[in-house]
Every structure is written in structure tokens, then in C-alpha cells.
Amino acid sequence: MPERGTTSRAVQGITQVDRLLHEPARLLIVASLYALEETDFRYLLNETGLTKGNLSSHLSKLERAGYVDIEKTFRGKIPLTIIRLTEAGRRAFDIYREQLRQIAAGLPERTEKDEDQR
Amino acid sequence: MPERGTTSRAVQGITQVDRLLHEPARLLIVASLYALEETDFRYLLNETGLTKGNLSSHLSKLERAGYVDIEKTFRGKIPLTIIRLTEAGRRAFDIYREQLRQIAAGLPERTEKDEDQR
DNA sequence: ACAGACTAGTTTGTAATACAAACTAGTCTG
DNA sequence: CAGACTAGTTTGTATTACAAACTAGTCTGT
């Protein structure tokens, strides 16, 4: 098995994270959805602080990946988009969360010697 | 101060991470450099597993941002590129490391109730 | 009744990206 | 001295992230 240097394995793992979730805007969307049964477009808009256009396109991307279900309904006569995290999305998030923690834990620390340098 | 929903502050902070370091390839480069006084192109190539082209362009980007110093020398008659993390790069990494840890810690967990759902 | 404001999103345009393949410039070897 | 090798850089391509402009319809004041 080829070793690739001295940087910790955990940190080298960063090259394999799910790029779909590594994008901050989408991680925020999915993290918001994670705790909820379902929610609507307006809620996510408020929760994430994204613009409508951005939120719309990130949701489409997550939908194409099978990470969210998007259901179009009406609240009275006004269109309402219901968004749900799928089981696949939930699993992908679980994996990403654990990878991120491994990586964060594995990043090198400032040592006392480093402090002296300046 | 406007609240933006129920997702934890730490996680909302993800929208403000340093995009230069959030890119896996570059984080790996900078994490590799962090522990070292200086190193060369060949070492990083091996350490990161990137292609030469990719490493070259990521290093240029880090150099433009002032995160690394690149010095061109010769080892005998063969060109040798020496790379060093600057103090600015070191500080940026310190900040990113802490932000990442906050975010990783703040991501929602799978609850017992969630487990039941499937 | 209908002009204009509002709700709820989607589509379009643009600049920046990440990546690998192709290239450059020179050195070493049989 | 041809070809293989070292050490990188440049170029080409497809994907992206983002906001501005747009679509489709509903509500409100006069």
C-alpha cells in the first residue's frame, strides 16, 4: 500500500469528501433540513441567507443527486415548495459529518516552537 | 441583531470560511506545508497526490494570495522549486482550522428518533 | 375593474473554478 | 546525438457559484 508522505491519513482523506456537501451553501441547506421532517422554500431562504436564485439552483442540484425531494403544492392559491431530505441525503450527510470531524481533528496544530518564530 | 433560523451559529459560519483553503487540494497543500520549514515541488507532488499541472496552478493561487513563497533555485543543474508557507498563510490556516472545528462540532447529529425512521 | 405591488420561485448570463492533457526548457544516458 | 527523463507551466474544457433579470400568478387600493 503506497504511503503518500507524512501528513495524516485523516487529512489526506479530504480529497475524497462529497463535493456536493462540501460547498458551504449546500451544507447549510442540508444541515438545516437534517433536523426537520420537511420545510418550505421560504424557511430555507431565511435560514441560509442565500438569494432566491441561488437557493433554487442549489436545491435543484441536491434534487438531481437524490439528496432532497421537492414537492410543489399550494398554500391556498399561492405556490408552496415543500423540501424534504431523502434517506440518501441523510446518509450522505452522516458520512460527510464524520469525515469532516476526522479531518478537523487531524489538521496540524501550532506548536510552541512555531509561536517563537514570531 | 437579525437571527436567521434555528441552525446553530457555528454551522451558519460556514458561509464565511476562506474559500482558498476550503478547496480540498489546497488545504492538503497548506496542511503539508504547515509542519515544515520549507519543501520542494516534488515532495508536495508525492504528499498530495495531485498532478503536476494541478499542483502548479494551486501553488500559483496560494502565492497570489500571499499564503506561500515560491523560490526558484537549482539543485546542481536541475531546477528546483522551494515552497514555504508565509506568516499570512499560517495565520489563515489557523483561522480556518478553528472555524472548521466549530462547524464540525455544530453539525446536527442523528438522534434516536431518526434511527427509528428506518 | 384594473394598475401596480407583492409572492414564489426559475432561468439566464458571467466570471471564476478545478482538473488533466499538452507543452516548454533543459539535462542525462546509451 | 537520439531519445528518455526531470521539473515544472500553459492551455483547453467542462463545471461551478452567484446575482440579476425574468416568469407566473395573487392581492390591494381606488
Image (cartoon, coloured by chain):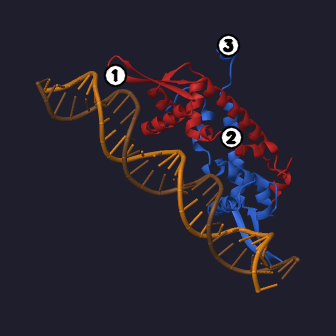
Chain colours: A red, B blue, C brown, D orange
Q: How many marks?
A: 3
Q: What residue type is labelled 2?
A: Val
Chain designation of label 1 = A
Residue found at x 81% / y 54%: B35
Query: Is disc 1 in the same subunit as disc 2?
Result: yes
- Provide residue A1's location: percent of width, then percent of height: 86, 46
Q: For mark 2, does the 10 Å Cα neighbourhood hold few (<14), some (14 to 19), or many (20 or more) residues?
A: some
Query: Is disc 3 in the same subunit as disc 1?
Result: no
Q: For mark 1, does the 10 Å Cα neighbourhood hold few (<14), some (14 to 19), or many (20 or more) residues?
A: few
Q: Is mark 2 on a helix, strand or loop?
A: loop
Q: Quadrant of residue D23?
A: top left
Would residue A111 be visible to someone looking at this image?
yes
Q: Nearer the viewer, residue B81 or A69?
A: A69
Q: What residue type is labelled 1?
A: Ile
Residue found at x 68% / y 58%: B88
Residue receiving disc 1 = A78
Residue receiving disc 2 = A17
- Provide residue B72's location: percent of width, then percent of height: 73, 73
Q: Is mark 3 on a helix, strand or loop?
A: helix
Label 3 to label 1: alpha-carbon separation: 34 Å
Label 1 to label 2: alpha-carbon separation: 39 Å
- Provide residue B17's location: percent of width, then percent of height: 61, 45
Chain designation of label 3 = B
Q: Which amino acid does label 3 sit on?
A: Asp
Q: Which of C11 and B19 is in front in this view?
A: C11
Q: Earlier in the sequence, mark 1 or mark 2?
A: 2
Chain designation of label 2 = A
Q: What label does residue B116 carry, if any?
A: 3
